[in-house]
Amino acid sequence: MSTQIDYDQLAQNYSSLRKASEHIISHVATRLKSGDIKQFAEIGCGTGDHLYALTQVLGGDAHGFDDSKEMLNQARLKYPELRARQGNVDERFPYNARSFGLAFSVNVIHYIKDLEHYFAEARRVLRDGGKVLTVTDSEDDIRNRTMARYFPETIKTDLRRYPSIEMIAAAMRSAGFSDIELTHTLHSYRIDESHLERFRNKASSTLRLIGQNCFDIGVSKMTADVKAGICEGQEVYTYVWGLK
């Protein structure tokens, strides 16, 4: 079982099969008044889906960076107006100090090697009074989401990969963030053929890290449940907010 994922090779797959979560965008937008955030940046923007969707709600001047050239190429094809550049999240962020009112990431924090460095860089590029946001999965999220039910090996895999919420909050405090707050969203939905296609094509890194037998069994069970009209999904996220 490989623990390395080449996102350049997966870029087209991700671009065609994944999209921004409307529930993430709605939740973030309700906490940020339109017009209050003039400039914001997504750390690890991938194919740009969440960055573009948030731009449509908040307006303002949006920027993003990612380590994968092909992910960025896909982002530019889909959203030519996005300002996306290459950069490594484990190094110095490719922005000047005090550039943004919001720095956020979605499903990126489990790739970070040094959380304290990451949040120190996030704080550096934020203006005074700016906010940092990490959208991630808590232990409860990992245990209760759809993948846990159909692909139980993902629980162990992601509990090993994901930093705990307590670790994230501690690194934020160490970097100088205050007013740390947790919020949560949970959305139930009926899994249909379009959702099933994403699982079949492993449009999630976790599904590329589990054993083939577990994957095959999970897809078979999900396919049967979709055909029977009884396949219910759970989208769960935890949001960790901090203030500079």
Image (cartoon, rainbow, N blue to C red):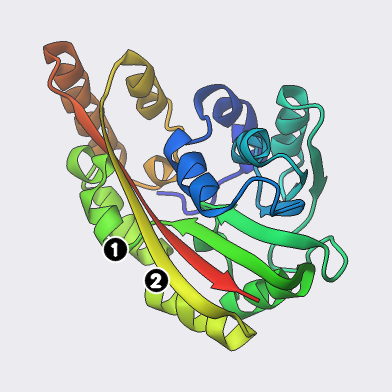
Question: Residue 9 vs residue 101: left or right?
Answer: left
Amino acid type assigned to the residue bearing label 2 in the image:
Ile
Front residue of this view, candidates 3 and 99: 99
Identity of the residue drawn at 65% across and 72% down:
118
Rate crowding at label 2 as few (under 14), some (14 to 19) or many (20 or more) other CA atoms within 10 Å.
Answer: some
- Residue assigned mark 1: 139
Quarter of the image holding residue 171? bottom right
Question: Residue 172 vs residue 161: left or right?
Answer: right
Mark 1 element type: helix
Identity of the residue drawn at 69% across and 78% down:
120
Amino acid type assigned to the residue bearing label 1 in the image:
Glu
Question: Which quarter shows the C terminus?
Answer: bottom right
Asked if the residue at tag 2 contacts the one at tag 1, i.e. Cβ–Cβ closer than 8 Å, the answer is yes
Q: Earlier in the sequence, mark 1 or mark 2?
A: 1
Quarter of the image holding residue 54? top right
Q: On screen, 177 above or below 226?
A: below
Front residue of this view, candidates 38 and 156: 38
Q: CA distance from mark 1 to mark 2?
A: 8 Å
Q: Position of residue 115 (x, y in %)?
A: 57, 75
